[in-house]
Image (cartoon, rainbow, N blue to C red):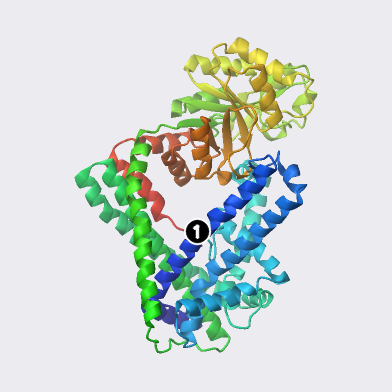
């Protein structure tokens, strides 16, 4: 009964306060647009003074040893936490004011939001970091902030875990715990925005009020909102198809996609506001507080003028983005990023095997990424893991064995078998079918001096035309290889990066893990004439997104899916519209 009453209150609030909801969305987005570039510029300037372009595994020591850099990064964390708290509580503030009979004005919402933010300025604010920056974005459950919506567990970690039964079980258990914790704290924004509730008490009260029966109701309500919002977006995409079909031009497809994206912003915002109103009404009912909409206060002329001005400004700023979307559509239709099979095509054949190479080529990959390691006697074999147990059942490291011992073993994966090839066998097989290789050097630390030179010498014999690329996570190894063979294309692989495009000191391309990628890196790479590849991109929506952005290539386990997506993007204006519109329909429980 409490949930039903809260639903009725939420619907009534949304009907009465839709203008306030719209203004809140525009203000939060505007604050993000204007504030975060300044914060980002401060971080970049600090990192540049240290002689690094960003924070990654190679620069972490330099950044950690600088008090100034640590102070700046700490300041950014504080600003981000405060901003995210205001972001996720603004709708609950509107609900509280409405249910308390207070006027919902710009000053009233700002004052109440500021009071909420001040609760995070003490030691209790540290409790918000794991909640706002880990639980909500990783689980996708709760009220996400524009600052944290792209935070996720790096897929190169989850992908490796899912390749073994033990890893998959551990990953499943960990994600279940994260999702459960996020659900138990789903009432936190509504509680912390109440007048006298501290951060610690709001967290505790949320756990107390979310037993299994309320949780089932909450999940049902959230899923229902997601379904309704997705259906509305689907209908919107269908309506937008009409002018695209009639015009059949990339300009029409791009402009329509821009309009759909703006409308999606509004639909998701109103859906988020409805859930915030529901949870606020529920918490007030459970605590015996007033949870009925009060008579509306007539807005003053200042509030009306500010509303009109803000709406006009938003329309003015949004209009150019709609029309520049036409240029984006043309670029998407003409760009042709390479599809790179990650270790071949693991879905169809054993990874890092010749059958995997052939399967990737048959599926349409132009390039195949392959890992090599050095054996005890200096041989170069194709293998990702240092220890052979996962794929062969032999619990020994490659550097402990001779080449003949390693290649005599049988690989077993997903019911398929294959032999372990040498680098020479793999290169010759790739050359026979006309597929380029992205050879990743995987140093295990036991190589004899001159490892880069030995690899370079063998590749130059096998590939004198230097059509195959070389990459590594080891920046110094990439530099050494580029010095020894400046004519061969090299790439620096980066597992995480905060900041600008990673520096290699030797030019060449960059292969960035997808959670670290941002559009600024792509622009910088274009300016410097460097290639930019993204790994490991398996989700269809992510593949579609990167292909549309125009990166030089994506590394993926799902080769056929990526090839098909690229073909659809190049199959005319209508197909391009339908392909990219699919990415605008899907939303999650966090309504991001």
User: Looking at the image, is 364 positioned above or below residue 547?
Assistant: above
Q: Nearer the viewer, residue 53 or 339?
A: 53
Apparent side of residue 204 relative to residue 469 in the rendered image (left or right): right
Apparent side of residue 560 relative to residue 515 in the rendered image (left or right): left
Judge whether residue 225 can be spotted in this image: no
- The residue wearing badge 1 is 34
Identify the residue at horizontal 49%, vertical 21% (top origin). Answer: 435
Q: Quadrant of residue 474 in the image?
A: top right
Judge whether residue 261 can be spotted in this image: yes
User: Looking at the image, is 440 positioned above or below residue 427?
Assistant: below
Q: Position of residue 528 (x, y in %)?
A: 53, 32
Identify the residue at horizontal 72%, vertical 33% (top origin). Answer: 389
Q: Position of residue 111 (x, y in %)?
A: 54, 78
Q: Secondary structure at mark 1?
A: helix
Q: Position of residue 310 (x, y in %)?
A: 39, 68
Apparent side of residue 30 relative to residue 452 in the rendered image (left or right): left
Q: How many marks?
A: 1
User: Looking at the image, is 38 positioned above or below residue 512?
Assistant: below
Q: Position of residue 3 (x, y in %)?
A: 49, 80
Identify the residue at horizontal 22%, vertical 51% (top origin). Answer: 242
Q: Residues within 10 Å of mark 1 (few under 14, many from 20)?
A: few
């Amino acid at each position: 009964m409490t949930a039903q009453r809260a639903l009725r209150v939420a619907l009534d609030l949304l009907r009465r306060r839709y203008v306030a909801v719209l203004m809140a969305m525009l203000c939060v987005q505007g604050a993000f647009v204007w504030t975060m570039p300044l914060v980002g510029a401060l971080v970049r300037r600090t990192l540049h003074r240290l002689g690094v372009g960003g924070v990654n595994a190679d620069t972490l020591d330099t950044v950690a040893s600088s008090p100034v850099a640590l102070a700046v990064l700490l300041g950014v964390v504080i600003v981000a936490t405060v901003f995210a708290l205001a972001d996720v509580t603004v709708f609950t503030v509107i609900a509280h004011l409405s249910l308390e009979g207070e006027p919902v004005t710009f000053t009233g919402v700002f004052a109440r939001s500021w009071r909420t933010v001040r609760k995070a300025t003490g030691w209790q604010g540290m409790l918000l970091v794991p909640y706002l920056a880990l639980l909500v974005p990783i689980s996708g459950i709760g009220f996400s902030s524009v600052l944290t919506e792209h935070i996720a567990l790096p897929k190169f970690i989850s992908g490796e875990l899912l390749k073994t039964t033990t890893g998959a079980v551990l990953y499943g258990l960990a994600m279940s715990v994260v999702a459960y914790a996020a659900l138990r704290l789903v009432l936190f924004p509504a509680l912390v925005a109440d007048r006298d509730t501290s951060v610690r008490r709001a967290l505790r009260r949320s756990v107390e009020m979310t037993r299994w029966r309320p949780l089932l109701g909450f999940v049902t309500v959230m899923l229902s909102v997601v379904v309704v919002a997705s259906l509305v977006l689907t209908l919107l995409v269908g309506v937008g198809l009409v002018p695209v079909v009639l015009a059949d031009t990339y300009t029409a497809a791009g402009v329509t996609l821009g309009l759909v994206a703006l409308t999606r912003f509004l639909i998701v915002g109103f859906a988020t506001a409805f859930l915030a109103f529901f949870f606020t009404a529920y918490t007030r009912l459970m605590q015996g507080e007033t949870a009925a909409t009060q008579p509306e206060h007539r807005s003053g002329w200042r509030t009306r003028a500010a509303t009109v001005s803000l709406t006009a400004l938003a329309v003015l700023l949004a209009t150019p983005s709609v029309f520049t979307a036409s240029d984006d559509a043309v670029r998407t239709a003409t760009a042709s990023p390479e599809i790179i099979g990650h270790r071949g095509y693991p879905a169809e054949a054993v990874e890092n095997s010749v059958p995997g190479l052939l399967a990737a080529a048959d599926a349409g990959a132009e390039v195949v990424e392959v890992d090599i390691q050095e054996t005890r006697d200096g041989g170069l074999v194709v293998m990702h893991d240092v220890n052979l147990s996962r794929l062969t059942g032999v619990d020994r490291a490659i550097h402990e064995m001779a080449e003949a011992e390693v290649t005599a073993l049988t690989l077993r994966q997903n019911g398929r078998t294959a032999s372990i090839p040498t680098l020479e066998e793999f290169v010759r097989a790739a050359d026979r079918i006309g597929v380029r290789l992205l050879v990743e050097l995987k140093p295990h630390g036991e190589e004899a001096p001159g490892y880069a030179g030995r690899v370079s010498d063998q590749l130059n014999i096998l590939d004198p035309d230097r059509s195959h690329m070389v990459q590594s996570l080891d920046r110094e190894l990439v530099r050494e290889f580029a010095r020894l063979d400046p004519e061969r294309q090299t790439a620096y692989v980066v597992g995480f990066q905060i900041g600008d495009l990673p520096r290699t000191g030797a030019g060449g391309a960059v292969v960035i893990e997808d959670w670290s990628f941002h559009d600024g890196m792509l622009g910088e790479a274009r300016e410097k004439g460097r290639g930019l590849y993204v790994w490991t991109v398996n989700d269809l929506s992510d593949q579609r997104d990167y292909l549309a952005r125009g990166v030089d290539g994506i590394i993926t386990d799902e080769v056929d899916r990526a090839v098909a997506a690229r073909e659809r993007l190049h199959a005319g204006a209508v197909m391009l519209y339908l392909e990219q519109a699919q990415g605008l329909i899907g939303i999650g429980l966090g309504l991001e």
